[in-house]
Image (cartoon, rainbow, N blue to C red):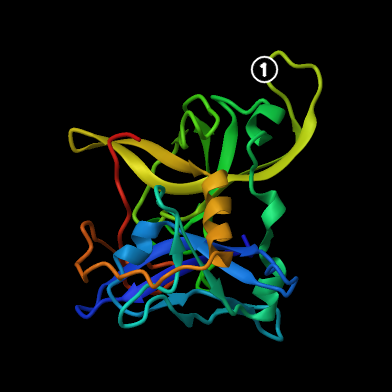
Amino acid sequence: MQATVQVEQKLPNGSHIIGTGFLINDPRPDGTPRTVLVTARHVFDRMPGATANIGYRVQEKDGSWAYEPQAVRIRSSDHELFVHHPSRDVVAISVTAPPEFAKAAIPLAWLAGADTFSKYSIGPGDEMMVLGYPQGLSADTAGFPILRSGRVASPVEPTNISPTFLLDFRVFPGNSGGPVFMSEADHRRPGGDQGQEVQFIAGMLTQQVEQNDVRLEIGIVTDAEFVRETIAELDQPRAPTPSLPDAAPTETTTAGAAIASRDVSAAVGRAVGD
């Protein structure tokens, strides 16, 4: 929860594009510290401006928390300043985070690897947690994310067979880019007689399933392996990448955001399948 942040950009018409991001601790090849923000690519693609706001939170002397967003430049006049996966809906960008957030950033090793799901026999029916900002809402005025849960609704295959899996979870605008994770002290599969501690980031919530314009209340989770691969791109030499043309978001939903006392609108991707 400490590493999950709101990613936001205000549009000229006064509405906002809002998504979810989370911070990863990924030292540079020379060992110097680096904090990386990851989110869904469509969140950045739908932000026409050059900067986005990251919703950091600071603790006051009396113990209360305050919302203090900071701007991060995501593109210059002719190219993107973030890296993206070549085939999946994931982006990563190095950020200068406040010390408390740099310390709270998720270790890269917590991201699920190629054998994580089979190691823990993860499959349909297992419960996973999701952090995000549904309809642009936060848990309080300080901007903490809202924690929700859902059950795995499909087989979880190796990424070379299926790059995503399904979660029985209603996706709202603003959830895109949120971390999907498991944390159980005594995880047991049906019929098993031994439990084991399970703690890992399974992936990123990127889309929702929609059939004939009907939302099926099923989320699509992009496997954490692709988050790893995207972060690795930060250390690869690359030519400037042309920015996508400025465009209005394809889906915008206005929300009152009474809890956070902020008037927002948000965008999220949608898919019929993957």
Q: Is residue 51 above or below residue 178?
A: below
Q: Quadrant of residue 119?
A: top right
**Position of residue 143 in the picture relative to residue 194 (left or right):** left
Residue 245 rendering spot, x and y as whole percentages: 21, 69
Residue underneath mark 1: 190
Badge 1, how many Cα within 10 Å: few under 14, some, many 20+? few
Residue for point 32% across, 64% down: 45
Closer-to-camera residue (30/265)? 30
Which residue is painted at 41% across and 40% down in the image?
A: 219
Relative horizontal placement of residue 98, taking residue 265 as reference (left or right) = right
At x 79%, y 31%, the residue is 196
Query: Which image quadrant for residue 51?
Result: bottom left
Image quadrant where one finds the C terminus: top left
The amino acid beneath tag 1 is Pro
Relative side of 71 to 58, left or right = left
The residue shown at (19%, 67%) is: 248
The answer to whether one can see residue 147 in this image is no
Dividing the image into 4 quarters, which one contains the N terminus? bottom right
Q: Nearer the viewer, residue 111 or 172?
A: 111
Instruction: Tell me if residue 178 comes above or below residue 33 in the rendering.
Output: above
Q: Secondary structure at mark 1?
A: loop
Q: Which one is in front, 248 or 62?
A: 248
